[in-house]
Image (cartoon, rainbow, N blue to C red):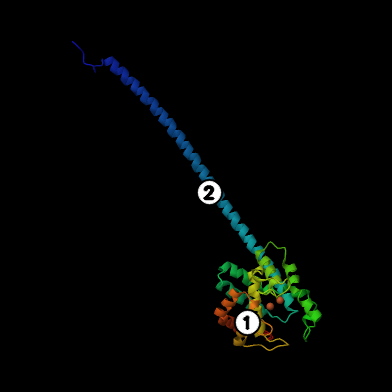
């Protein structure tokens, strides 16, 4: 009798089953080892991840502390310079109210011409220091009641450079901006200003803004040698010129911003007045 082809005697079957079983046991062992390795790996990854998160938190805390220190340092710088600015006021006809108004005029110009709030605030904070160099001009000139002669006038014209030297070399962005403004707030767009005769965009934006605000405020203010002008007349001089002031002195973009916002200038001038002596 011929046995069918798939007939396997019991012994052989048992052998094959045993071998398959032990093969499976080996696979199971391998899988177990693999699983345990993977678990170890993922545990390691988890630990590393936790460590990284802890480092990140440390870094964040260190960065926040550093930023706080930088802010404190900036405040200390600003405080020193405010004191310098106060010192310069003792020598000058320009008052505290003038300085405050100048910050506001400059910020309006900064915002209207598209600077963001942070940069506009920087100019706001730096503008009061524009005349700090006047501390270096002799009293006999600063407090002379009558008009200055040519030689005296040349000495007064040194105040932008003196101010810039006082403010120079600081790591503070505030003082760097203040230094640029102090140096260039008498420059004119058409190149006819001082001390360097800079032209157009070679004049830092902050300097151009303070120059326009300073001109508006000086025209509105009474001086021993001139009366205070009303807002309308002042606008007319800035926008159309007179014998001393030309529209070409100003950055055309800022002049447009002034044309748009002139009522704000008037509001600031009326709201921020010198309480003690009416010199503004
Ligand atoms: Fe000045
Ligand atoms: Fe001024």
Residue 272 visible in the picture: no
For label 2, count other residues whose C-alpha is less than 10 Å away and answer few (under 14), some (14-19) or many (20+).
few
* Closer to us: 149 or 274: 149
For label 1, count other residues whose C-alpha is less than 10 Å away and answer few (under 14), some (14-19) or many (20+).
many
Q: Residue drawn at (75%, 74%), measured in percent from left and top?
A: 159
Report the quarter where the C terminus lies. Answer: bottom right
Q: How many marks?
A: 2
Is 143 located above or below residue 71 in the figure?
below
Is 227 located above or below residue 198 in the figure?
below
Residue 135 visible in the picture: yes
N-terminal-most mark, 2 or 1: 2
* Closer to us: 211 or 251: 251
Is 230 located above or below residue 4 in the figure?
below
Q: Quadrant of residue 201?
A: bottom right
Residue 238 is tagged as: 1
- Name the residue tied to disc 2: 53
Q: Quadrant of residue 272?
A: bottom right
Cβ of mark 1 under 8 Å from ligand 2: the answer is no
Q: Residue drawn at (78%, 74%), measured in percent from left and top?
A: 136
Mark nearest the camera among 2 and 1 is 1
Residue 114, image x, y percentages: 55, 70
Residue 279, image x, y percentages: 69, 85
Q: Residue drawn at (28%, 15%), measured in percent from left and top?
A: 11
Cβ of mark 2 under 8 Å from ligand 2: the answer is no
Disc 2/disc 1 C-alpha distance (Å):
59 Å
Q: Quadrant of ligand 2?
A: bottom right
- Please tell me whether mark 2 sits on a helix, a strand or a loop: helix
Going by the picture, which residue comes out furthest to the left? 1
Report the quarter where the N terminus lies. Answer: top left
């Amino acid at each position: 009798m011929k046995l069918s082809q798939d007939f396997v005697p019991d012994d052989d079957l048992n052998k094959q089953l045993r071998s398959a079983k032990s093969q499976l046991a080996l696979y199971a062992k391998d899988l177990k080892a693999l699983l345990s390795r993977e678990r170890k790996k993922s545990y390691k990854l988890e630990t590393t991840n936790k460590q990284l998160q802890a480092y990140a938190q440390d870094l964040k805390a260190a960065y926040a502390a550093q930023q706080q220190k930088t802010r404190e340092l900036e405040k200390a710088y600003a405080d020193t310079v405010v004191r310098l600015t106060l010192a310069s006021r003792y020598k000058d006809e320009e008052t505290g109210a003038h300085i405050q108004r100048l910050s506001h005029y400059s910020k309006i110009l900064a915002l209207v011409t598209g600077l963001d709030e942070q940069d506009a605030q920087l100019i706001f904070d730096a503008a009061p220091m524009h005349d700090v160099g006047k501390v270096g001009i002799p009293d006999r000139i600063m407090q002379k009641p009558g008009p200055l002669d040519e030689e005296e006038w040349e000495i007064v014209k040194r105040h932008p450079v003196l101010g810039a030297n006082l403010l120079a070399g600081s790591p503070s962005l505030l003082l760097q901006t203040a230094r640029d403004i102090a140096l260039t707030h008498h420059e004119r767009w058409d190149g006819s200003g001082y001390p360097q005769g800079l032209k157009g965009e070679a004049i830092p934006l902050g300097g151009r803004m303070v120059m326009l605000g300073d001109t508006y405020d000086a025209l509105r203010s009474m001086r021993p040698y001139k009366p205070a002008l009303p807002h309308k007349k002042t606008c007319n001089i800035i926008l159309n010129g007179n014998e001393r002031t030309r529209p070409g002195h100003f950055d055309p973009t800022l002049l447009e911003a002034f044309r748009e916002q002139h009522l704000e200038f008037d509001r600031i001038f009326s709201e921020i007045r010198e309480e003690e002596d009416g010199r503004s």
